[in-house]
């Protein structure tokens, strides 16, 4: 038996002993027993009252004095209170640290509830998003009134980010990302990307300017080289070889400059996609005809038009993407091989597959193929004067049309480059054009 109960039972035993003595004196054991019970009850009420007074006082100091089970009860409650106090202190310290850390964060952080209402935000959110304490409980959409942001919230596709200006200053550019966590809770993180955007613009302006400036001297050089190699006076074979090499390299530099200029144009954020119906079957026929005329020694080119669907978009950008893929297939496939260009409709969008029986590409190169200047040495091809910009252009042009480039290839088994266009871009009949344009595509 534990000691509190032992002392409690000894107390009861003592009370019974006193009762027996009183019963003998008063000559009535019933009255004596009543007295004893009342005394025992009074003792418990006394200690219960002491406990209540102590708890009400809110003092966490030493517990009141008690005996029997009450001493143990007081001590256990005292220990529990002390432990809770310690935990509370730890929590407060942790909360303080969290507050200091979030306050030091340069990014605005807002906790959103299930109905997009603001639950909490840090100091950077006041500075960047202009939120005030009184905005707690308000829906974030009421405070950040930008169509792009509303669309992003409605779409609920949080893999991407959205860029909006700060509500406090138009010249501050914010990139917003939503991170879902817990049950129905989301964290909105807004990063100030003004400097980053500025640097990107400087870089792309620089590339565009350099490429533009290189064009004129290159054209002049190319012209002179052509004149010299076609001169009336026949040249020695070794000189002719040198001129041919120089001509090849100027052509290559020209294609690099053109590629860089196209990429800069595609990357420029202000440059919106022109909305026009593009006759894809006719465009593919033209590109295949051009590819056939390029060289005598080339693989067979087969065009399969499974649908006559068109696309809404920018004709020049789509032409550049499709011709890059088709010309690559022709370039890298040996003359005995075959290139199949297939335009098809899978009900959820349209797709252009450019399939070849060329050398194929090793798996580890595939994720990097769309990087600028990334080239893979192809056996027996010596990269055929490629710039490594073609697939980067394809990727940019497609992403501006909401389309995706998929690459499937295996060494020695050929490659298949697919452009997958979303349903919103597809036009199947004349009446669809106006409807899709009205949707604001
Ligand atoms: P390039 O101007 O060098 O062709 P691209 O960006 O168009 O640049 O292509 C990048 C690399 O991808 C090429 O160097 C080539 O190795 C590889 N590649 C592209 N298309 C094919 C293809 N159809 N078959 C095999 N390799 C290809």
Image (cartoon, helix red, strand yellow):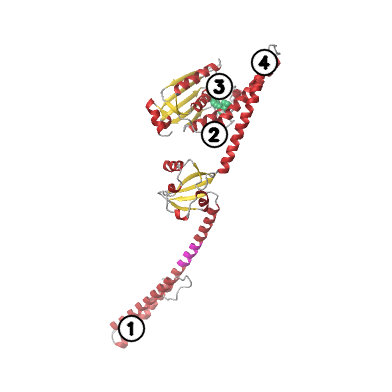
The C terminus: image quadrant: top left
Q: Determine which residue is flagged by label 3.
A: 331
User: Which numbered tag is attached to residue 399?
Assistant: none
Which residue is located at x 36 percent, y 82 percent? 17
Label 2 sits on a secondary structure element that is helix
Dot 1 beta carbon under 8 Å from ligand 1: no
Residue closest to the far bottom: 25
Label 4 sits on a secondary structure element that is helix
Q: Determine which residue is flagged by label 4.
A: 229
Cβ–Cβ under 8 Å for marks 3 and 1: no
Nearer the observer: mark 3 or 1; the answer is 3
Q: Is residue 233 above or below residue 90?
A: above
Spatial CA span between label 2 and label 3: 26 Å
Q: Is residue 78 above or below residue 403?
A: below
The mark nearer the N terminus, 2 or 4, is 4
Nearer the observer: mark 4 or 3; the answer is 4
Dot 3 beta carbon under 8 Å from ligand 1: yes
Q: Determine which residue is flagged by label 2.
A: 267
Extent of the magenta region: 80-89
Q: Position of residue 294 (x, y in %)?
A: 55, 17
Label 1 sits on a secondary structure element that is helix
Dot 4 beta carbon under 8 Å from ligand 1: no
Mark 2 neighbour density, 10 Å: few (under 14) some (14–19) many (20 or more): some
* 303 sits left or right of 262 in the view: left
Q: Position of residue 322 (x, y in %)?
A: 50, 25
Please say whether residue 69 is visible from this viewpoint: no
Which residue is located at x 33 percent, y 83 percent? 20
The mark nearer the N terminus, 2 or 3, is 2
Cβ–Cβ under 8 Å for marks 2 and 3: no
């Amino acid at each position: 038996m534990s000691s509190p109960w032992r002392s409690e039972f000894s107390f009861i035993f003592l009370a019974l002993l006193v009762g027996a003595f009183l019963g003998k004196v008063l000559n009535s054991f019933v009255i004596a027993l009543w007295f004893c019970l009342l005394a025992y009850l009074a003792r418990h009420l006394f200690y219960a009252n002491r406990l209540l007074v102590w708890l009400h006082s809110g003092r966490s100091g030493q517990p009141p004095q008690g005996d029997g089970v009450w001493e143990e009860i007081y001590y256990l409650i005292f220990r529990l209170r002390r432990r809770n106090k310690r935990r509370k202190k730890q929590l407060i310290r942790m909360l303080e640290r969290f507050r200091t850390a979030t306050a030091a964060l340069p990014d605005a952080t807002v906790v959103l509830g299930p109905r997009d209402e603001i639950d909490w935000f840090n100091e950077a959110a006041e500075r960047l998003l202009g939120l005030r304490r009184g905005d707690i409980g308000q829906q974030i959409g009421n405070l950040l009134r930008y169509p792009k942001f509303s669309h992003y919230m409605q779409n609920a596709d949080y893999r991407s980010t959205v860029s909006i200006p700060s509500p406090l200053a138009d010249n501050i550019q914010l990139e917003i990302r939503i991170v879902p966590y817990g049950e129905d809770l989301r964290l909105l993180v807004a990063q100030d990307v003004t400097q980053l955007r500025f640097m990107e613009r400087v870089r792309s302006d620089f590339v565009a300017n350099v490429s533009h400036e290189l064009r004129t001297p290159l054209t002049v050089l190319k012209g002179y080289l052509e004149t010299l190699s076609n001169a009336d006076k026949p040249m020695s074979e070794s000189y002719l070889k040198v001129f041919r090499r120089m001509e090849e390299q100027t052509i290559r530099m020209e294609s690099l400059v053109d590629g860089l200029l196209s990429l800069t144009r595609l990357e420029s954020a202000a440059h919106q996609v022109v909305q026009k119906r593009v006759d894809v079957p006719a465009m593919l026929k033209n590109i295949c005809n051009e590819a056939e005329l390029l060289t005598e020694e080339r693989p067979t080119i087969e065009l399969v038009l499974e649908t006559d669907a068109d696309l809404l978009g920018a004709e020049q950008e789509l032409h550049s993407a499709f011709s890059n893929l088709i010309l690559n297939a022709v370039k890298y496939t040996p003359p005995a091989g075959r290139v199949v260009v297939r335009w098809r409709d899978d009900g959820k969008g349209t797709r252009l597959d450019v399939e070849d029986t060329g050398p194929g590409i090793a798996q580890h190169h595939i994720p990097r193929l769309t990087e600028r200047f990334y080239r893979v040495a192809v056996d027996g091809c010596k990269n055929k004067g490629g710039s490594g910009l073609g697939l980067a252009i394809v990727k940019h042009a497609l992403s501006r049309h909401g389309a995706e480039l998929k690459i499937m290839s295996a060494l020695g088994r050929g490659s298949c480059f697919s452009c997958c266009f979303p349903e919103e871009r597809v036009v199947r009949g004349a009446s669809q054009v106006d409807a899709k344009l009205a949707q604001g595509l």
